[in-house]
Image (cartoon, grey):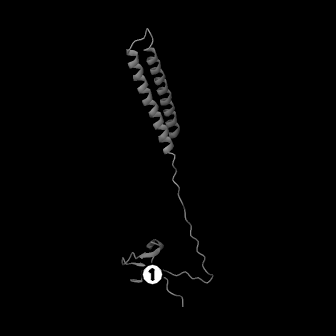
Amino acid sequence: MGKTLLYIGAGILFLFGLGLVVLGGFYAIGSTAPTGSQSWLTFGLGFGCVGVLFLAGGAGLVYAGIRGQKTEVVQQVTMKVDLPGDTKISQVTCRNCGGALKPENIKMVAGAPMVECPFCGTTYQLTEEPKW
């Protein structure tokens, strides 16, 4: 609805500005007639300048409408991990105090998993110990 009103307003400004420019042209041409007056040229130039301002305003509204059409692109990344069949899931604990860690305590920083223990405040890189 907002863009529609913007374009309607731009169309009205264009038509009004075009009418003022044409009227200004008539006054300017009329000032050169044998029965015309020099003051008509002043009116013609005034109407023409105001008409150009209205045309510029309409163009500005159209430009604002076009610029406002940007849509934000959201990219969702899904990571799938293929685990072998004999994988056991165990509780992750803090290596300093032994407190149970939750997934929100582990964050990826520069490509490495970092743990921040909510109990003792220790921060360290999570490493996987060998299985043998």
The residue sitting at 41% across, 26% down in the picture is 49
Residue 118 percent across, percent down from the top left: 39, 75
Where is 84 relative to 78, above or below?
Answer: below
Where is 46 relative to 122, above or below?
Answer: above
* Quadrant including the C terminus: bottom right
The residue sitting at 38% across, 14% down in the picture is 38
In the current view of this chain or complex, which residue is farthest to the top? Answer: 35
Alpha-carbon neighbours of circle 1 within 10 Å: few (<14), some, or many (≥20)? some
Where disc 1 sits, the SS reads loop
Residue 29 percent across, percent down from the top left: 46, 17
In the current view of this chain or complex, which residue is farthest to the right? Answer: 85
Give the number of marks: 1
Q: Amino acid at mark 1?
A: Thr
Check disc 1 and report the residue beneath it: 93
Where is 105 relative to 63, above or below?
Answer: below
The residue sitting at 44% across, 73% down in the picture is 105
Asked which quadrant contains residue 76, the reply is bottom right
Left or right: residue 20 compared with residue 122: right
Left or right: residue 62 compared with residue 97: right
Asked which quadrant contains residue 100, the reply is bottom left
Query: In the image shown, does 6 or 21 lie closer to the viewer?
Result: 21
Asked which quadrant contains residue 45, the reply is top left
